[in-house]
């Protein structure tokens, strides 16, 4: 496997020159650098790099984002070396030790079908932005997509050119590209291997352009969509329940009818709009119905308990019960009922 380092660079300093020379001294076949912006004050750095044997510098006329730079580099590498190359993506700011880059490269050589992540442990004197960004994305990635990773934002990654080609269709062009990459790997069924690396922050990580809120937005969307579908379902459910209850139907009959109508609408929305699932209805629907029945009985029991022991009015008890089982419903549907479609 030809090892090629891919470095997206935006406003780099001399650390990039030192990094490139060190990698060339450690048996990298080639280094591809993407100048993401072509700002005149940084021209001298890129001109120096372009004159080094084994280094290719690609240029974006304007800043398009880290994701776009990675895709430009991947496309270039795959177009020249095809599937016999191993790509190691490395950040340009000097926060990855050469020894750690080599560790990721060695792991890729031994596990060529996997995605290799160089993962920081986020202990010690970690800048708040980095700690918060990683902690929040780790939690939400686990909650929304079932991926449990140590470092969701690492730029040190190893992958075969064959795998890297699959990421070229990702639409994201900024830091969310790296999150989308993780989601695609999950859908593809590719194993992710985590390699511990040293945590290095230069000048309190001021050189990082990562925004922990906006650049992590992708992983929130499944929860947002599920919440939206749940909100619409809750309106239907509660509206039918209230009408039937005040028309004189018993509590159980009102609850069961409202839940049946709302669940039919919810199934269609969740399957097609939330999880984009290709699971056959013959498989997904029975599991969904069983979940609705179990959670419906749980909701009914919570309503009875709330009315009897809190005490709450029936309508408030109904809303309280549904709020409590919302997260359980999401996790059950994501994990056991609907499989995400491969894109």
Image (cartoon, grey):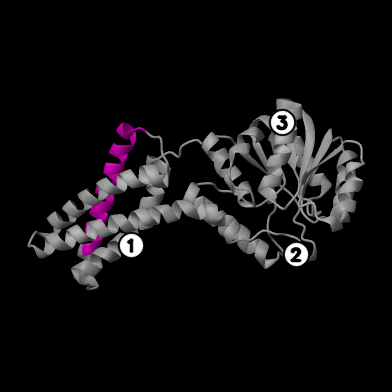
Asked if residue 109 shows in the view, the reply is no
Of mark 2 and mark 1, the one earlier in the sequence is 2
Q: Which mark, by number, is residue 78? A: 3
Nearer the observer: mark 2 or 1; the answer is 2
Mark 1 Cα shell of 10 Å, populated few (<14), some (14-19), many (≥20): few
Q: Which mark, by number, is residue 323? A: 1
User: Where residue 194 sits: x, y (%)?
Assistant: 66, 44
Rendered view: 292 above or below 83: below
Rendered view: 125 above or below 93: below
Quick one: SS at disc 2?
loop
Identify which residue is drawn at 66% across, 29% down: 162
Identify which residue is drawn at 76% across, 36% down: 106
User: Where residue 130 sits: x, y (%)?
Assistant: 67, 61
Quick one: SS at disc 1?
helix
Q: Nearer the viewer, residue 326 or 222?
A: 222
Q: Nearer the viewer, residue 143 or 305?
A: 143
Identify which residue is drawn at 35% across, 53% down: 229
* In this rendering, position of residue 298 left or right of residue 81: left
Q: Residue 283 in magenta?
A: yes
Of mark 2 and mark 3, the one earlier in the sequence is 3
Distance, label 2 to label 3, CA atoms, is: 33 Å
Of mark 1 and mark 3, the one earlier in the sequence is 3
The region drawn magenta spans 280-303
Asked if residue 164 shows in the view, the reply is yes
Q: Which mark, by number, is residue 206? A: 2
Q: Residue 233 in magenta?
A: no
């Amino acid at each position: 496997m030809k090892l090629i380092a891919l470095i997206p660079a935006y406003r780099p300093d001399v650390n990039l020159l030192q990094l490139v020379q060190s990698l060339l001294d450690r048996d990298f076949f080639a280094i591809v650098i993407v100048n993401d912006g072509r700002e005149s004050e940084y021209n001298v750095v890129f001109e120096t790099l372009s004159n080094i044997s084994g280094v290719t510098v690609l240029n974006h006329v304007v800043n398009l984002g880290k994701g776009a730079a990675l895709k430009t580099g991947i496309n270039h590498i795959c177009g020249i070396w095809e599937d016999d190359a191993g790509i190691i993506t490395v950040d340009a700011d000097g926060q990855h030790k050469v020894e750690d880059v080599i560790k990721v490269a060695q792991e890729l050589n031994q596990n060529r079908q996997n995605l290799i992540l160089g993962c920081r442990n986020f202990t010690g004197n970690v800048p708040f932005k980095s700690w918060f960004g990683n902690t929040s994305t780790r939690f939400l990635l686990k909650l929304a997509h079932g991926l449990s990773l140590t470092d969701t934002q690492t730029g040190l990654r190893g992958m075969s050119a064959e795998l890297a080609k699959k990421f070229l269709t990702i639409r994201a062009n900024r830091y969310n590209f790296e999150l989308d990459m993780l989601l695609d790997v999950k859908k593809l069924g590719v194993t992710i291997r985590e390699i511990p690396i040293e945590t290095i922050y230069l000048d309190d990580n001021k050189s990082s352009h990562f925004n922990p809120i906006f650049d992590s937005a992708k992983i929130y969307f499944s929860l947002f969509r599920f919440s939206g579908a749940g909100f619409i379902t809750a309106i239907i459910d509660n509206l039918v329940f209230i009408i039937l209850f005040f028309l004189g139907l018993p509590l159980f009959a009102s609850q069961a009818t409202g839940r049946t109508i709302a669940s039919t609408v919810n199934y269609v929305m969740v399957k097609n709009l939330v999880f984009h699932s290709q699971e056959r209805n013959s498989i997904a629907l029975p599991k969904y119905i069983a979940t609705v029945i179990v959670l419906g009985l749980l909701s009914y029991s919570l309503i009875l308990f709330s009315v009897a022991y809190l005490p709450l009015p029936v309508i408030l008890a109904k809303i309280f019960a549904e709020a409590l089982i919302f997260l359980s419903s999401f996790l059950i549907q994501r994990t056991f009922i609907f499989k995400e479609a491969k894109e």
